[in-house]
Image: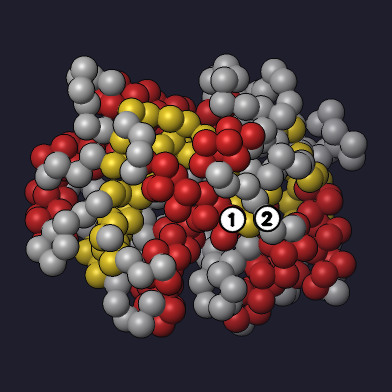
Amino acid sequence: MHYIVTGGAGYLGSHMTAYLHENGHRVTILDNFSNSDYDAFSRLQSICDNSINLMELDLRDQGKLNAAFITASLKEPVAAVLHFAGLKAVGESSRDPLLYYRNNLESTMSLIEAMEKHKVHSLVFSSSATVYGTPEILPVNESARLNTTNPYGATKLICEDILRDVALSKTDSPWRIAILRYFNPVGAHRSGKIGEKPQGTPNNLMPYVFDVATGKRREVNVFGSDYDTKDGTGVRDYIHVTDLIEGHAAALRYLQNNKGVEAFNLGTGEGYSVLDMIQRTEMITKQPVPYVFTARRPGDLGTVYADPGKAKTLLQWEAKRTLDDMISDQWRWQNNLK
């Protein structure tokens, strides 16, 4: 089959593209390289035998987006779209909320309009566990109250609402939409050729931890030491990027037989603190990872981890890889960046 992957040169999108290629599918990437670079795409191409079609564009440019759908469909019809493109840093979103609202909402609406125009009605949407805000019950499941605490999460929640309205707008709607609420992706491709490479200062914990482990940065800033957790630092559900991508593949299979819109958690169901992650990284890499405590960041939460039972039941998917797998694979990737 032929799939369009938006943001396909980024961390998650590149792994999705590699997975689809490895399983015999054609892939067209749409990316404006705001969160990735050409070197990342070159490494991806080396995994995919230079077979990936890239169209460089901003999804908000409706003219170029429509042209991309036309061009992409010439050799083979597009079966579905996997929408990874978007800005994703919680802290940055709190500092510049309009940037996030303009980019994430407008790009998603533009994409839906183009899909409707070109009669492509299957979509896997990258959402986030941030739509739950501060969980009232742990582990958090898909029926929990949605009440995000930061602009990034708000853009994901609004996009979810838009997708539900679109999917349910007609009695016999053709739309098939899977909303995947990620927890915290970690790790890298088994080849060590692609992984997370943030531009500038990393916004996520583990890229920062590995920058310190490799000597690129002096110490990790641990935001908050007074959360109601075992060691005072934030607790999150970390999931190997390969498990996450396999969850997307399961969602694509689910959509072949199910119309409408459905949301799924993709997580392991187990929480680790910031200090857990630092200490485990030191143990596996044999490198020191010094850290200092700093103030909490706006929008950050104390403890969030998933109930992934719905995905196990309906998608026949569950995470298989361990925390040690996540850290070992990311360490291999990080060393390839030297």
- Res 29 quadrant in image: bottom left
Compared to 154, does 186 lie above or below?
A: below
Q: Position of residue 149 (x, y in %)?
A: 57, 25
Give the residue at the far right of this rendering: 230
Left or right relative to 51: residue 139: right
Could you tell me which residue is drawn at 36 percent across and 70 percent down?
24
Left or right relative to 289: residue 296: left
Q: Element under label 1?
A: helix
Q: Position of residue 61 (x, y in %)?
A: 17, 47
Could you tell me which residue is drawn at 26 percent across and 33 percent down?
175
> From the image, which quarter does the C terminus lie in?
bottom right
Q: Report which residue position mark 1 lands on.
A: 243
Disc on the earlier residue, 1 or 2: 1
- Res 32 quadrant in image: bottom left
> From the image, which quarter does the N terminus lie in?
bottom left
Q: Report which residue position mark 2 lands on.
A: 320
Q: Element under label 2?
A: loop
Compared to 158, does 293 lie above or below?
A: below
Which residue is more in the foreground, 232 or 183?
183
Residue 162 shows in the view: no
Q: Give the amino acid type for the residue marked by disc 1 in the picture.
A: Asp
Which residue is more in the foreground, 81 or 10?
81
Answer whether labels 1 and 2 touch (C-beta < 8 Å): yes
- Res 21 quadrant in image: bottom left
Compared to 158, does 38 lie above or below?
A: below
